[in-house]
Image (cartoon, rainbow, N blue to C red):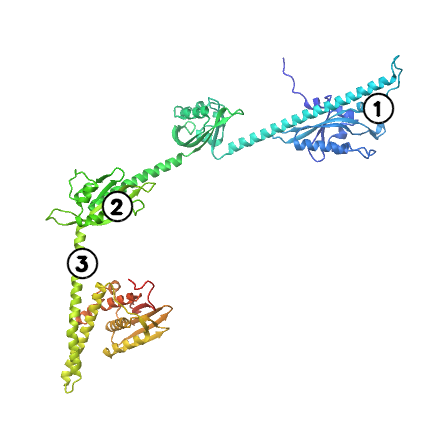
Amino acid sequence: MSAPFPPDFQLLFEQSPGSFLVLAPDADFTIVAVSDAYLRVTMTTRERLLGRPLFEVFPDNPADPGATSTRNVRASLERVMALRAPDSMPVLKYDIRRPESEGSGFDERYWITLNSPVLSPEGEVRYLIHRTEDVTDFVRLSLQGGEARAPTAAPPGQSPHLEQDALRRGQAFLQATNQELREAVRARDESLALAARSRAEAERQRASLHAVFMQAPTAITILQGPRYVVELANPLVCRIWGRRPEQVLGKPLFEALPEIVNQGVEELLARVLTTGVPYVGKELPVRVARLEGGAVEDVYFNFVYEPRRDSQGHVEGIIVVASDVTELVRARQRTEALAAEEVRAAEERLRLAMAAMEMGTWDMNLTARTLVWDERMRALFGLPADAPIDYPTLHSCVHPEDRERVNRLACRAMAPGGPGVLAVEYRIASPEGRTLRWVSTQGQVHFDGSGRPTRFLGTGMDVTARKTMEAEAKARADFEQQLIGIVSHDLRNPLSAILLGTHALLGQEGLGERQMKSVVRIQSSAQRAVRLVKALLDFTQARLGGGLRVERRPLELAPLILQMVLEVEAAWPERTIEVHREGDTRGEWDGDRIAQVVTNLVTNALKYSPADSRVRVEARGVDGWVFLRVHNTGTPIPADKLPLLFQPLRRATTEVDKAGRSVGLGLYIVDHIARAHGGSVEVSSSEGEGTTFTVRLPRSAPPGGRPS
């Protein structure tokens, strides 16, 4: 039998026995299709209706001022569009215009109407179906009742009114039945509309959820049933699996991905499906072929297996959310490998450095109360390589005079809340006749989360040679300083006697010129010796006493500078010294010490400048400071000598040494006097600018007392 022709749906619609009108869901409800039955009942033609607005073709009856037919039908159609559900109207009076061939005007008509939507796959209203049924005759019959009939004779013995009563009762029953029918139809229509809306909403939500899954920035798959059939697989999970969607959808997981069998995935899925408890995995390694036809490789995933439940709460499947962290894991593995190599190299460098420094290590486990020493640490204490080591043994190896101090510092470092650091130098108890040895120990305590000490790690190093050198240097320095102090102090008495004698001789009359010159030379030499002794005493005080003592008093610096310059000029009558003052130069200083500074700097400038040059001395006050500057020209000080100028017994040239006029303490004392006042001294020297010494003095004592 041959296949039937495809049905002609337009022909079927137009010749269907129902009275239908198809409308567009626009503002005018434009007529787009009409059945033949509708044309007959409304006395119209298809050409007159198609493409025209509904209410333009079927207006209200102008002869009926209370007509609401168009308004009621429009309201019903708008409800259909808003609710996307059918809307049934009660019996509606809607008069129809007669054709001109029948005299025009309007016929009174009554209708039962049902308006229904035609929805697109997306749930939007595509068309409106306006279905009508003409019930005019029935309505008229109901309204007229018995009066519409001609009266007939009643049967013998029966009143004619009985027939009319029966007719009225039948009409009432028919109206009640019609009302119940309309209510049932309305309830059915509402139920159908609600179901349609629910289906549309469910479909919309399903489509929305599906779109979310497919566009999610993470891999998602839904597995159904005990065979884990792949119900959904978004693009990211397909990319991870190395499969196209058609290769996995609708297939059991382990058939679609046979390479993941026996890798522990089955057990995890079965546990979630059986217990309904989600499972969270982190960096799970799985061997999978991520490229079609490619080799199987190790891939790492972070994932969640979430049970999927039906409406009764039973687990029917599993939702898998996963992310590929392969590159992250491999990067971390590479970093850890590099870090391990760096640690190994660092440990090797540390071992070599410790070997070069002859340094030993120790490790004390404070929980297990054990102590481990390496070979070098044992050698430092003179212990055999196989000798047992514990803290009492260590304590017994320390010199008796140092044991209490070492134990106190170690206990302090290990105490909860303590510094956790040990740094101590101590002597090792050695047999009589052996050289005393010194060890320097550095340690670090490690604490647990509760602050309890758990490990004590450290190093030990033999510092005997350094300690010996320090002791020898200190003894030598003490001897030198004591010697200088004794010599300088003991020289003051005979020098004072010499100066007193020369002063008395110069006051006598009758000395010859030759004798006078000899006495003046003796006096000059004695004064130079006094200055030298005074410098030695200041040097000794600075070295032994921790700094020079100053007694502050109110002082005007400019007049003091002028006075000292005049005294220096008396010894250098052939030289010119300029003095300049700028600003307020008042402050609180030790006048005698500041006089030393001026004399030493001006004399130093005269010594190391050409005989025909000038020396400039400047006093300048700025805010809380007063500056003393002494400038001279001549050969600049070598750059490599500048850092040494303020050290004792150091000079920038040897010319004065040969003349026997200086021991190199002047600038050292100037520096100490400046620092004793809380100030400083600086020097600059160049070929073009000459040499300038600048002393910076605060007007008053610095906060906190005397500076260090």
Residue furthest to the left in view is: 433
In front of the other: 528 or 651:
528
Question: Helix, strand or loop at disc 2?
Answer: helix
The residue at 29%/65% (across/down) is 675
Q: Is residue 195 above or below residue 528?
A: above
Residue tagged by mark 3?
Answer: 474
Residue 223 seen in render: no
Position of residue 47 measured from the top left corner of the image (x, y, whole percent):
76, 29
Question: Is residue 427 found left or right of 60 in the rendered image?
Answer: left
Position of residue 516 measured from the top left corner of the image (x, y, whole percent):
15, 83
Determine the CA span between mark 1 and mark 2.
120 Å
Position of residue 663 measured from the top left corner of the image (x, y, whole percent):
19, 68
Question: Is residue 63 found left or right of 649 in the rendered image?
Answer: right
Instruction: Determine which of the numbered discs, if any, sits on residue 130 in the image.
Output: none
* Amino acid at the residue labelled 3: Lys
Q: Nearer the viewer, mark 3 or mark 2?
A: 2
* Amino acid at the residue labelled 1: Gln
Residue 296 seen in render: yes
Question: Helix, strand or loop at disc 3?
Answer: helix
Question: Is residue 400 found left or right of 600 in the rendered image?
Answer: left
In front of the other: 127 or 698:
698
Determine the CA span between mark 3 and mark 2.
32 Å
First-in-chain label (3 vs 1): 1
Residue tagged by mark 2?
Answer: 411
Quadrant placement of the C terminus: bottom left
Residue furthest to the bottom in view is: 510
Determine the CA span between mark 3 and mark 1.
142 Å
Question: Helix, strand or loop at disc 1?
Answer: helix
- Label 3: how many residues lie within 10 Å, few (<14), some (14-19) or many (20+)? few
The residue at 23%/46% (across/down) is 407
Position of residue 155 measured from the top left corner of the image (x, y, whole percent):
87, 13
